[in-house]
Image: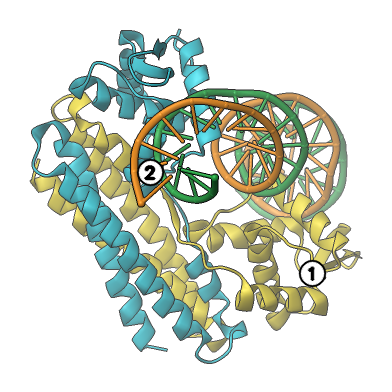
Chain colours: A cyan, B yellow, C green, D orange
Amino acid sequence: MTASLSTTSYALLGLLVFDSETSEHGLTGYELKQRADRTLRFYWVSPAMSQIYTELDRLSGTGYVQGADDTSGKRTTRRFRITPAGRESLETWLHTSEHEFPMLKHPIALRLMLGSLMGPGEVEAMLDGYVSAVADRRKELEAVREMLGDNEAVAYPARVADWGLAYYDAEVEIVEKLRRTL
Amino acid sequence: MTASLSTTSYALLGLLVFDSETSEHGLTGYELKQRADRTLRFYWVSPAMSQIYTELDRLSGTGYVQGADDTSGKRTTRRFRITPAGRESLETWLHTSEHEFPMLKHPIALRLMLGSLMGPGEVEAMLDGYVSAVADRRKELEAVREMLGDNEAVAYPARVADWGLAYYDAEVEIVEKLRRTL
DNA sequence: TGTAGCATGTAAGCCGTTACATGATTGA
DNA sequence: TCAATCATGTAACGGCTTACATGCTACA
């Protein structure tokens, strides 16, 4: 029987799969957090450091990752690699689990609903601020997209990044149109 | 000093504001859940029933809502109304709080990242399923939009619904384009 | 020498869910 | 009479965050 994990656990396992295909030494918890900040953050969550270490302990417990002391550097660190069992569990999850609908927590839309309680100009300012925040976000994601390039090994992550970029573009267009109707 | 509440608390407070502008008798926890299912769900969350009652207790504690036994019907229920203090707290929140960036938890995008571990056809099937799930969602939101009509009192909620519809349309377009590149 | 980044954890606590429990009313 | 809906809660627990604690290394 397969231990059932949270989606976040599988997401981290996914990051470890990509690592295993390009390197042999694994990732530290710290490095895993950096990867999450670069990728997962845009369409899932980037767990807190403390959460990363907790998940790594959990995944070690189920045998899905294996941690080993790395003494090759200046400092001894623990590096984690995905195990065959972990890879299998991840694949089973991909094949069999329910595909839940995305969950969007959108504080700007929530506030807009209460626009009648806001002052004149305040709604506009909020939407302008949001458009510029999206632009910032987009730039960050663009940098990630450029890093992925056209490397076949990360063709799917690149597609996800493209999806994200198109989403941000659509969002800006929608909000700017909405802004003009106020 | 104002008690600091979760965003979900303010969202419920917002629903109670709309009620207060159209009726005088308030909402039961059960009705509040129904409103959340119709509106909040699309761009925030619709809390579980148990959470609704917990929040109502909390909001009663801070004096932001007031519950009263309603014995006018066949059955005695508790109906909640927002208080002037609650309305003020909500407005303060609208004016002063940080506008966090939306949070998207997108299981489909997450799985797509791991597309290289999925079988041929499996990615396509997943995306097709997603497109049809979005279509279903869109229909639900469309029904809500129609209910709002062009009633001035809910002009802002109507705009939020329009935003949601445009978002679903964009999502379908993006995914269908992506689908063709596989 | 001091600050930023690397590296790893524990503890407390919030938010929210599912499961469980109870019971009234409406309508087929 | 039986199922669906209305209506209200408690208990247990999972997931995740913030705050706190510690210490090494690189570099300006």
Quarter of the image for the N terminus of chain A: give it: top left
Judge whether B163 appears above or below A101 on screen.
Answer: below
Comparing A18 with D11, the one in front is A18
Q: Mark 1 points at which residue?
A: B2
Occupied quadrant, residue B8:
bottom right
Quarter of the image for the C terminus of chain A: give it: bottom left
Chain for disc number 1: B
Occupied quadrant, residue B88:
bottom right
Picture coordinates of residue A179 (x, y %)?
38, 83
Picture coordinates of residue A178 (x, y %)?
36, 80
Picture coordinates of residue A25 (x, y %)?
28, 17
Q: How far apart are the alpha carbons under marks 2 and 1?
A: 34 Å
Picture coordinates of residue B106 (x, y %)?
37, 45
Q: Residue furthest bottom?
A: A120
Q: Do labels 2 and 1 share a chain?
A: no
Q: Residue A37 got which mark?
A: 2
Comparing B64 with A9, the one in front is A9
| Residue A4 in sight here | no
The three-letter amino acid code for the residue at tag 1 is: Thr
The three-letter amino acid code for the residue at tag 2 is: Asp
